[in-house]
Amino acid sequence: MNLKVALLAVCSLILTPVWAIDEGAASQALEQLKGLTGNWQGTFEWTGARTATGSMNATYYTTGNGSALVENLIMEGAPIMTSVYHLDGADLRMTHFCGAQNQPRLKAGRVDLKRGAIDFDFVDITNLRSAAAPHVHGLELRLFDRNHLSIIFLFQDNGKESQEHIALKRVEEKPS
C-alpha cells in the first residue's frame, strides 16, 4: 500500500507543470504591477514578419477601487492600446484593447517575481474578424527594477509571427 501512495505522489509531482503559479503569486504579481503607477517614456521595435521602430510612452493607474491596473500605451500624444490587469480568483488576467481593434484575453502562465518575469498566455479573443486577422497571442513583462520595464507583445498576422518590444523608463516627477 505504501508503495502505491509513494508512486502516486511521484507521478503527481512529475505531471505538475513546472510553470504552475503557486498560491498567492498572482495577487503578489498584481501588487507589484500596481507599483508601475505613473508616467513612462521609451521606445518600441517590431521584429519578425513586421518591422518598425519609434517612440512610445505609457501611463499606469489603478481603477476599480484598486482591483485593476490600467496601462495606456501612447504614441504621438494619443493612447493607441490599453491593457487592464486584474485578478480572477487565483489567476492574474489581462485584457488587451489592441490597435488591431480586437480584444485578446490572456492569463499569467508564469510568474517569477524574483526575476521580475510575468508571462501571459492566450485564452480567447473578442472581435477577431477572421482566424488570420492580426492579434496578440502572448505577452512577456520584465520588471527590471522600480524604474525600468520591458513589454513584449507576441503577435500573429495571417500566420506570420512578430514581436513588439517596448522598453520603458519611469518619468520622475519633479518636486513642486
Image (cartoon, rainbow, N blue to C red):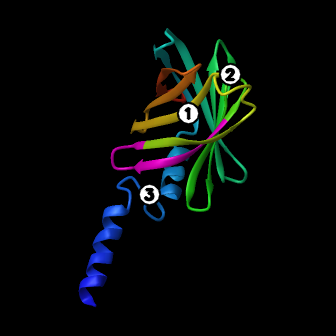
Which circle's residue, 1 or 2, is located before the other in the chain? 2
Q: Which residues are magenta?
A: 104-117
Q: Amino acid at mark 1?
A: His
Which residue position holds label 1? Answer: 137
Whether residue 176 is visible here, answered yes or no, is: no
Q: Is residue 86 left or right of residue 2?
A: right
The quadrant of the rendering that contains the N terminus is bottom left
Residue 10 appears at what percent x and percent y?
Answer: 28, 71
Determine whether 76 is above or below 96 in the image: above
Q: Which residue is nearer to you in this view: 165 or 107?
A: 107
Residue 152 in percent (x, y) is at 47, 28
Question: Front-most of 41 and 26?
Answer: 26
Badge 2 amino acid? Ala
Q: Calculate the distance from the C-alpha at mark 3 to the C-alpha at mark 1.
A: 20 Å
Q: Secondary structure at mark 1?
A: strand
The answer to whether 114 appears left or right of 147 in the picture is left
Q: Earlier in the sequence, mark 3 or mark 1?
A: 3
Q: Do the residues under discs 3 and 2 have CB atoms within 8 angstroms?
A: no
Asked whether the beta carbons under mark 1 and mark 2 sit within 8 Å of each other, the answer is: no
Q: Is residue 114 magenta?
A: yes
- Residue 150 placement, left or right of 61: left
Toward the bottom, the furthest residue is 1
**Which residue is at the front of the view, 131 or 81?**
131
Contact, mark 3 vs mark 1 (Cβ under 8 Å): no
Q: The residue tagged with tag 3: helix, strand or loop?
A: loop
Q: Residue under circle 3?
A: 21
Q: Which mark identifies residue 100?
A: 2
Callout 3, which amino acid? Ile
